[in-house]
Amino acid sequence: MKGSILLHACCAPCSTAFVEKLSSIGEEPYLYFFNPNIHPYMEFNSRLESFRAFMSASGHDGEVDPGYGLTSFIGGMKDMERPGRCRYCYRTRLCSAASRAAAIGLGRFTTTLTISPYQDHGLIIEEGMKAAEENGVEFVYFDLRSEYRRSRHMAREAGYYMQKYCGCVFSEAERFDPSKGGRLK
Ligand code: SF4
């Protein structure tokens, strides 16, 4: 057994306080980085390398998927708007996490996405439950939004890469493009 629960990890900053919290309640997280939603490549690579540094420092077992999912990911959701786009995104990542949990003999999984107040928790729960049912495992929801600010602080202290937008190119445009309500700084 590689842990007590598989933890789908979206990035190093969100993993900091999440992993600490799981450990404090007696869970042993098995870390799993799978995020084909992150674009463009240099952004993906920055988050991937930062997560590798976090995993190494944390001492927890786990694995990272280094595949850059631009074509496959965009191909599946290019004609969608929110919230369908985010539902597709959660489904992609949580199905992979559930499948991986089943494959390595862990009966439960969760995700660091639920530390963020900017994510849609209702959709995450729905897609997590579906992915769990399809793979014969259990999805465990942890509402850790109260830990979000602390996770940012912990990440800055550790020198982890701090992203400025959610992940996909659409969220990048929303963050920076003034015509979409964003700002360049
Ligand atoms: S905004 Fe975030 S959650 Fe929604 S599709 Fe883009 S990367 Fe995924």
Image: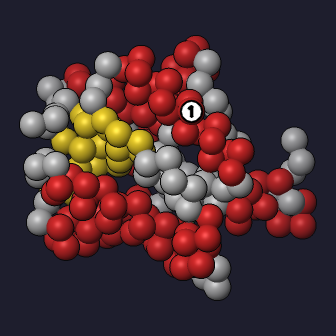
Q: Quadrant of residue 43?
A: top right
Q: Taking the image as drawn, is residue 175 in sight?
A: yes
- Residue 108 in view in this figure: no
Q: Residue at x 42, y 17 (%)?
A: 57
- The residue tagged 1 is 49
Q: Quadrant of the N terminus?
A: top left
> Considering the numbered disc 1 on the image, is that residue within a helix, a strand or a loop?
helix
For image coordinates 39% across by 69% down, the residue present is 91
Question: Which residue type carries mark 1?
Answer: Glu
Q: Position of residue 181 (x, y in %)?
A: 83, 61
Q: Which sits in the foreground, 174 or 76?
A: 76
User: Between residues 36 and 180, which one lies in front from this camera angle?
Assistant: 36
Answer above or below: position of 30 versus 137: above
For mark 1, does the 10 Å Cα neighbourhood hold few (<14), some (14 to 19), or many (20 or more) residues? some
- Residue 13 pos. (x, y %): 52, 32
Residue situated in front as seen by the camera: 76 or 21? 76
Quarter of the image that includes the C terminus: top right
Nearest the viewer among 176 and 59 is: 59
| Above-or-below relation of 138 to 145 | below
